[in-house]
Amino acid sequence: MSNARINGLRSIELGVPDLQASADFYRKVWALEDVATEGDSFHLRGTGTDHHVVTLRQRPKAGLLGVHFSAADRATVDALHGHAKSLGANIESAPAVLPASAGGGYGFRVSTPEGHPLCISADVKQHAEAIDDRSRPTKLTHVVLNSADVPNQTAFFLDVLGFKWSDSTQMMDFVRCCSDHHSIAFARGNGPGLNHMAYEMPNIDGLMRGAGRLQKNGFKIEWGVGRHGPGNNVFSYFVEPNGFVTEYTTEVDQVDDSYVSHDAKYWADLNIWPCRWNMAGPPSERARAAMSGKLVEETNERCEQVMARALGR
């Protein structure tokens, strides 16, 4: 195992068929802020100092284009690239200088064994100051990916990228690259895809203010408000216009190397799913469909039908 490791989750990159409508949601409802425009793409920031937390790119179909991670420096990027290459990982691009509109820096792209697209970079520009507004998300705090081969995907993150195992349940494996209990989780499913993305709110009051803003704009809570088992974080889940699941969360456990990981039996015996508080029931049927990727598929089908009618087919 290489000593080089990722040290943080940076942002998520999404393909969307209607760029303007998607950007309006993430600006006006999800409460992110424009940072830069890059041709057919928007980069938007939270209230933290990360250059951006989401990139939206105009594409014929909605889909996950990349999960972006940080490394300490260029030497670490090069070491991770060399280690991934030596183990036969699918390298999509060699380390290189990245576009200035996306914060610049130096990085490369690689895919997991199942095909999830990742980008690892260092020296990306950060904002000098954070924004003081507890009703808006500060950062992207975790991403959950669907997988038909969770053990293999988890091993890739541990052995190739230097993540540490936090917990496993009957549904997911949770791994971390910083003090947050989990930065990535793998949900047992039928194949690779985006299950959901989670944005950190400053506190529970901020989460409730944000959730209220979503409901005021016609986006009801599809799961929550509740408190998870692994990670102990407070959660509220929504489905955004493209069919992706997006979460406001707060108070995720902060852990270090002294943390004792737990297996699926531990969590099953604890019997606290779907909510430690016994307040939130299970996810709505709509949330489950979206987490599986079904609603994104329906969005893409509608777009194809519109395009076919426009072309007279």
Image (tube, helix red, strand yellow):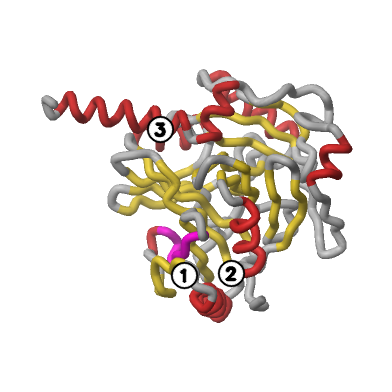
Q: Which mark is residue 266?
A: none
Q: Which residue is mark 1?
A: 107
Question: Measuring 56% from the left and 44% from the top, which residue is drawn there?
Answer: 146
Q: Is residue 29 above or below residue 257?
A: above
Precedes in sequence: disc 1 or disc 3: 1
Q: Which mark is residue 71?
A: 2
User: Can residue 131 be seen in this snapshot?
Assistant: no
Query: Decide: marks 1, 3 in contact (CB < 8 A)?
Result: no
Quadrant where the C terminus is found in the figure = top left
Quick one: 262 or 76, which is closer to the camera?
A: 262
Question: Measuring 35% from the left and 33% from the top, which residue is drawn there?
Answer: 300
Q: Amino acid at mark 1?
A: Gly
SS assignment at label 1: strand
- In this view, the mark in front (1 or 3): 3
Quick one: 244 or 51, which is closer to the camera?
A: 244
Q: Is residue 299 left or right of residue 294?
A: left
> Where does the magenta region start and end?
102-112
Q: CA distance from mark 2 to mark 3?
A: 33 Å
Q: Which residue is mark 3?
A: 297
Q: Amino acid at mark 2?
A: Ala
Query: Decide: marks 2, 3 in contact (CB < 8 A)?
Result: no
Q: Is residue 260 left or right of residue 111?
A: right
Query: Decide: marks 1, 2 in contact (CB < 8 A)?
Result: yes
Q: Amino acid at mark 3?
A: Glu
